[in-house]
Image (cartoon, rainbow, N blue to C red):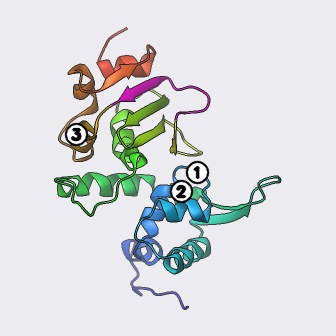
Amino acid sequence: MPRRSYDQYCAAARALDAVGDRWTLLIVRELLAGARRYTDLHADLPGVSTDMLATRLKDMERDGIAVRRRLPAPASAYVYELTPRGRELLPVLTALGEWGAPALAERRATDAVRAHWLALPLLRQLEGLGEPGVVDVRLDEGEFHVRVGSQEGPVYGDGAFPGGADVRLTLDAEVGGAVARGELGLTAAVRAGRVALEGTGALAKGLLALEG
């Protein structure tokens, strides 16, 4: 299929040529967690057809946003991952999420949800503390971890961080929704006891707004 283009000599138009199609940026959101198999991507993108997902992944490979590679034995499975240029879309997704947060309102009965979809809104607030580290997050829907201050590699991942996190946060669906909508700041939620915190390092102190 020939590449569609806006045919405009404009940086925004060129960007939308590459990532403006339906599902592309949501695939990027999933690949910010690191290398993912096709079946994993399909499972975490409810509503996308197999043909559409395959087409978008091929488009992303063509445009230098993602690559497909084979894992070494014994796995020998194929995975997709972002290129450095693809990872540069993180601030784009962060800004889009911040802009779209007020539209979340109450969760609709038809809305799918995954715990790790809260990773990017949380990361934006955690980055503002200026302290690097890894944060495990436990929600009603599941558990994931966020890598704060990471300049390369996965931004987040499912489950607890294998090497042990610096901070562990536990929050319910109500608080998670308020944070996602931008109605509740993470540090305020921690100080008010609405988010349980475990950890004693600099990142934990930043969340508690403690000095020293």
Distance between the alpha carbons at the discs numbered 1 and 3: 28 Å
Q: Residue at x 52, y 34 (%)?
A: 160
Q: Position of residue 41 (x, y in %)?
A: 53, 62
Q: Tell me which amino acid carries mark 2.
A: Leu
Residue found at the far bottom of this picture: 2
Q: Position of residue 140 (x, y in %)?
A: 35, 39
Residue 86 lies in the magenta-colored region? no
Residue receiving disc 1: 34
Give the extent of the magenta segment: 160-170
Find residue 185 and report its image quarter.
Answer: top left
Looking at the rendering, in which quadrant would you find the C terminus? top left
Find residue 179 and report its image quarter.
Answer: top left
Residue receiving disc 3: 174
Whichever of callouts 1 and 3 sits on the residue coming sooner in the sequence is 1
Residue receiving disc 2: 31
Instruction: Indicate which label's residue lies in the foreground, 1 or 3.
Output: 3
Residue found at the far right of this picture: 73
Residue 164 lies in the magenta-colored region? yes
For label 3, the SS is: helix
